[in-house]
Image: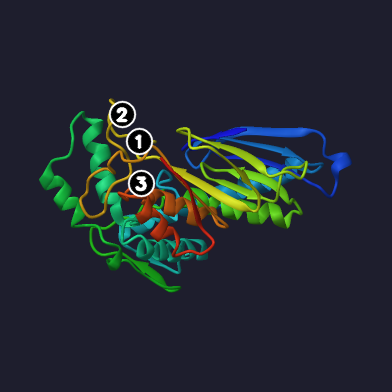
Amino acid sequence: MAMLTRRRFLAICAASVALPARAGTIREWRGVAMGSAASIRLSHPDADAIIARALAEVDRLEDIFSLYRPDSTLVRLNATGVLEAPPFELLECLALAGRVHAATGGLFDPTIQPLWSLYAAAYAVGRSPTGSEIGMALARCGWARVKFDSGEIRLAPGMALTLNGIAQGFVADKVADLLRAEGLNRILIDTGELSALGPQPDGTPWPVTLDAGAGTLALADRALATSAPLGTVFDAAGTVGHILHPATGRPAPALWQIVSISAPSAALADALSTAGCLMTSRAAIVAAVSAFPSARLEAAV
């Protein structure tokens, strides 16, 4: 079984049921995608060409969503506060982010980037942010001040966006779309979130074992995302988590080791699991997830 953690890498396993006799050799690629170590494993007679197209799609999406590429669309938006004729993928992602923001009572908020940058900079020099610094960063946050339509995206002065809580899943969805168009229908895609397009090559669901003793589940034609308050940390001691509360400016309390959500969309599961880490009861997570009839809480431990 696959052990699911809050990893930051891309792993695609796919097989073609249309050509089983020719699809015995597994091709593997390893490199970097979305800023982290990545791999693709593919069993298909045209594996090399399909891998190349999948990597080109990941690269195209990184040019939109990455905070690490200095010329990405998101970096340019954050630098100038306005983006004319935004790419459809960015608008699609922001629209979904807005729906999850509403369903979670504002806990999922991509405008916390100024706050995240504050924590990263402070702990880089061995200190924690002060209360006044946190207050100043919070004043630059607030989803209600993000305006977007097909003509432009506009941020209020001093604002910046991070889509790290949704973009991993969004990329998984788009790569799944590409591979589906290639005729592949037994695929497991891992970008830190899992997207299963159909079952395994043998026809059985993909078996997944969750962290923290949360059990196992069978995945097919569904996506799964897991977030952990301490999955990524700012401090050397490993006690200051990366999921920040948009109202208080403080890290998520360590009430949960993991929160796992499944849904037809990996982007939706990704965003809901991120927000779930900030919720103080299982009932609150279930209530937020129930706003999306197709989504389901799989684990909160």
Q: Position of residue 189 (x, y in %)?
A: 61, 44
Near-viewer residue (72 or 232): 232
Dot 3 corresponds to which residue? 277
Distance CA(mark 2)–CA(mark 1): 7 Å
Q: Quadrant of the C terminus?
A: top left
- Amino acid at pointer 3: Cys
Q: Can the viewer see residue 83 in this picture?
A: yes
Q: In the displayed structure, does residue 39 sit left or right of residue 18?
A: left
Category of crowding for the residue at label 3, using alpha-carbon neighbours closer than 10 angstroms: few (below 14), some (14–19), many (at least 20):
many
Residue at the extreme front of the image, as rendered? 283
Near-viewer residue (3 or 290): 290
- Amino acid at pointer 2: Gly
Dot 2 corresponds to which residue? 238
Q: Earlier in the sequence, mark 1 or mark 3?
A: 1
Dot 1 corresponds to which residue? 230
Q: Earlier in the sequence, mark 2 or mark 1?
A: 1
Residue for point 70% across, 55% down: 180
- Amino acid at pointer 1: Leu
Mark 2 secondary-structure assignment: loop
Q: Position of residue 158 (x, y in %)?
A: 23, 58
Q: In the displayed structure, does residue 252 sit left or right of residue 173?
A: left
Q: Are marks 2 and 1 in contact (CB under 8 Å)?
A: yes
Residue for point 15% across, 52% down: 136
Select label 2 or label 3 by which is in front. Answer: 3
